[in-house]
Image (spheres, rainbow, N blue to C red):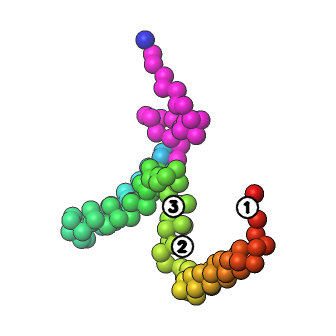
Amino acid sequence: MIEVKIPKDIQEYKSKLIAGMSTRQIIAIAGALAVGVPLGVAGYGRISGDTLSWLVILSVAPFAGWGWFTFKDMKFEVFMKSFLSMNFLPQRRVYEDTDINLFCSLHEEIAENEIVNQHIENGDYEDE
């Protein structure tokens, strides 16, 4: 009998094209092959196999990230944009002196309590 998984959330649904991979992943494989194979062929015999394999891996890694990487339902390009902007662009820092704010709020509270106490002493305050 054929079983089909039905996701509970519609956003979890991913259409599969070939071999359980999405269109995005197949395009990523094609891009990785388009970059990695010519680089491997061009470097074969000119540099050591160890160095060549690392060059191919590092040149193909962005394609793999683009095709498969997701973090908290963010695609690779959205994640990298937010990661780079949060870590490398200057951020606006708001300085707020908490001691002054604490002093002002305590001063206002003390003043309100003194006013209430004066009304109680004068008999202006009535319990309901």
Residue 79: where, in percent of width, then height? Answer: 51, 61
Toward the right, the furthest residue is 124
Dot 2: few (<14), some (14–19), or many (≥20) neighbours within 10 Å? Answer: few
Residue 89: where, in percent of width, then height? Answer: 53, 79
Amino acid type at circle 3 is Phe
Q: Quadrant of the C terminus?
A: bottom right
Indicate the quadrant where residue 104 lies.
bottom right
**Of callouts 1 and 3, the N-terminal one:** 3
Give the extent of the magenta segment.
2-24
Mark 2 and mark 1: span between their CA atoms? 58 Å
Residue at which label 3 appears: 79
Question: Camera-side residue: 96 or 52?
Answer: 96
Residue 118: where, in percent of width, then height? Answer: 71, 80
Indicate the quadrant where residue 92 lies.
bottom right
Q: Are marks 1 and 3 in contact (CB under 8 Å)?
A: no
Amino acid type at circle 2 is Ser
Indicate the quadrant where residue 96 lies.
bottom right
Residue at which label 1 appears: 127
Residue at which label 2 appears: 85
Mark 1 and mark 3: span between their CA atoms? 60 Å
Question: Camera-side residue: 121 or 68?
Answer: 121
Amino acid type at circle 1 is Asp
- The reply to whether residue 95 is visible in this rendering is no
Q: Nearer the viewer, mark 1 or mark 3?
A: 1
